[in-house]
Structures are given as C-alpha cells and as structure tokens.
Amino acid sequence: MRETTMKILPVLGYQKEALIFWKELLAFGAEEELKDPDYILVLGGDGTFLGAERDHYALQKPFVGVGFGSVNFLLNRSIKDPEDLMRRMEEGRWTKFPAYGMEAEIRTDEKIEKGIAFNDIYLKSIDPTRVVELELETKEYSSLNIKGDGLIIATPQGSTAYNRNAGGTILPLASKLWCLTGICTAKPFHVAIEHQEISVKIKRNNAVVVTDNKVFYGACELRIIPSRSRAEVCFCDEENFEKRRYNE
C-alpha cells in the first residue's frame, strides 16, 4: 500500500478491464474525488475520452487517458500497470497538450439548443440525397456561400479525425486555430482561421449539426464561439503523440 493519496475523478468506459484497472488503482493510493481532483482519469476508448472532456473541462484539471478501446487515439497506449500510472501522476511526468473546445448554439424553427465539442462540429443536409447551401460569416469571410454535402469545423485535436479524411489541414496541437473544411463542396474549401465567433446560416434544406457525437436535427443557424475554459491532455513520453497524429 502506497502512502501517497492521489485525488482522481474516474471516467470509465464499458470495458470490464477498465473497472478492474480502477479497482487496482485504489489499492495504490487513488482516492475518488468528484469536485476537486488532481486528475481526471479516463479508462476506456476515444468516445469515452471525448465525453469526459465535454463533461469535465470546466474543472480545468489535467486529463489522463489509459486506452481500453479499439483505437485509443487520444489515450495512452503504453501504460499497462496501475502502480506505474500512480507513480507518473505523483511525479507529474507528462507531455501536456491544450485542448480548446468549441461552444455551439444551434437554432431550429422551435428552439435554441447548446452543445460543446473538442474534436469537431459539422453540418450536413438532413436528406442525404440533397446538397445543403450555407452562408458563412467569420472575420476573414463575409457572407461566403458554401454549397455541397456540408462543412466541418475542427479543433487542433480533431483536425486528424473527420477533417483529415475530408482533405482538411492538420493543425499543430498548441495552436489557437480551427479548420474549416468543405465536405464535397462545389468549390474546394480547406482553410485555417484563428479562434473566433463563427456564424453559419442554412440557406437551403434543413441541416443536421453534430458536435463530436451529439446530434441536433432541423438546424437553421449555427453559432460557434471558443470555450471559456480549456482541457489539458497528458501523455507519457513513450507515446510520441505528435508522431501518431501525422502517421495514423
């Protein structure tokens, strides 16, 4: 039994191995703390990690992920031992990356809904057989018309996900930039802009808006602003997360 107590807010995926790992961690000095933890510990896969970021980013505590999912892109893959993890948390031996979120306000014909994303927000036509026509407003673009399958707005963390598959730019993790990437648009659209307020009006055909994995139907307008807080993601040195982002 270790003498050090480490206050941890645990976020567990559905994998039974994640629960076993957490129970073993308790034996090495971990203490569950929901309000003022030293770390937010995610044991699961990438979906679990994104959900933890959205739910707990306002605590402004470091996130450590241990991969138990199928891909584990956002989590540490080399950590296998609970005692080793406790030692790393005690010593603070991490490479840390900021994760900037996007706060979204989605207006439909009936109401205004809110969401937050740490990877990406994208819009598509509700009817997959039809294109959507958008009007984009940023500091750089005034009433820019975009016509096609949709539009992706991605953070540096999320720039290697859907954005990369659509041909978008991969952003440096520490940058305060967002990617705007058209999805099969009439004119290719792949740009990077600074964090700012963005307005997107749906001019033709109602759209579906997706914030990470939360879906909003019947959108007429979307407004995005930088989140008021940021998450901080921890990786052990063996992970070489920057290399992973560009090579996978």
Image (cartoon, rainbow, N blue to C red):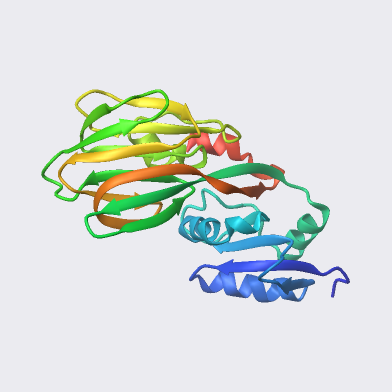
Q: Quadrant of residue 64?
A: bottom right
Quick check: 219 above or below 237? below
Q: In which quarter of the image is residue 147?
A: top left
Residue 79 percent coordinates (x, y): 66, 56
Quick check: 225 above or below 148? below
**The one of 230 and 71 positioned closer to us in this rendering:** 230
Residue 151 horizontal side relative to residue 61, left or right: left
Q: Which residue is drawn at 54% across and 38% down?
A: 244
Q: Quadrant of the N terminus?
A: bottom right
- Numbered marks: total: 0
Residue 145 percent coordinates (x, y): 24, 28
Residue 119 horizontal side relative to residue 235, left or right: left
Quick check: 78 above or below 140? below
Q: Residue at x 68, y 43 (%)?
A: 96
**The one of 78 and 232 positioned closer to us in this rendering:** 232
Quick check: 148 above or below 78? above
Residue 230 percent coordinates (x, y): 60, 47
Q: Which residue is drawn at 50% across and 59% down?
A: 45
**The one of 166 and 118 positioned closer to us in this rendering:** 118
Residue 99 percent coordinates (x, y): 57, 44
Q: In which quarter of the image is residue 82?
A: bottom right
Q: Residue at x 53, y 57 (%)?
A: 49
Residue reaching furthest right? 3
